[in-house]
Amino acid sequence: MDPIVKETATGITLSIHALPDSSRSEIVGVHDGKLKVKIAAKSIDGKANKALVTFLATYFSVSKSAVTLIRGERSRDKVIAITGDPRLLTTKLRTFNADQDT
C-alpha cells in the first residue's frame, strides 16, 4: 500500500501536504510522500483545517465527524484519520491515482 495511506482498525490515515489559500479545494498529486491537497481557505484561525476536513469528507463520501486531524494543526504537513471501510476509502483514492495517470 502507498506510504501516504495506512489502514487502521477503524479506517485509514492519510499523510497530507496542504496548500491553503488556493483558488479551489482539490487533490493535485503527491509531494514528498504526502498527498498534496489545495485548500480554498486561508490558514487563519483554523479555517484551512476546517475546510480540509470538509473537503475530505465530501471526497470520500463520509460525514465530517468521520474525518479527524490527528497531527499538524499548525503545519502544512498533516495526518488525517478517516473512519470507514478501509477498502472503500483506498479504492476512492486509487480512483484519483488512475485519473492522474491518464
Image: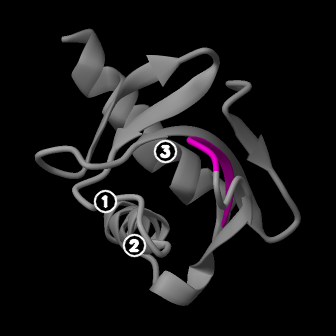
- Could you say which disc has been placed on residue 91 in the image? 3
- Could you say which disc has been placed on residue 47 in the image? 2
Determine which residue is flagged by label 1. 42
Q: Check disc 2 and give the amino acid type.
A: Lys
* Residue 89 at x, y percent in the picture: 54, 55
Q: Check if residue 38 falls in the magenta segment.
A: no
- Could you say which disc has been placed on residue 24 in the image? none
Q: Check disc 3 and give the amino acid type.
A: Thr
Front tag of 2 and 3: 2
Question: Mark 2 to mark 3: distance in Å?
Answer: 28 Å
> In terms of secondary structure, where does tag 1 sit?
loop
Report the predominant secondary structure element of the magenta stretch.
strand
Residue closest to the far front: 44
Q: Is residue 77 left or right of residue 26?
A: right
Labelled pair 2, 1 in contact (Cβ < 8 Å):
yes
**Residue segment shown in magenta:** 75-81
Q: Residue placed at 72% from the left, 52% from the top?
A: 13
Question: Mark 1 to mark 3: distance in Å?
Answer: 30 Å
Q: Residues within 10 Å of mark 2 (few under 14, many from 20)?
A: some
Q: Is residue 89 left or right of residue 75?
A: left
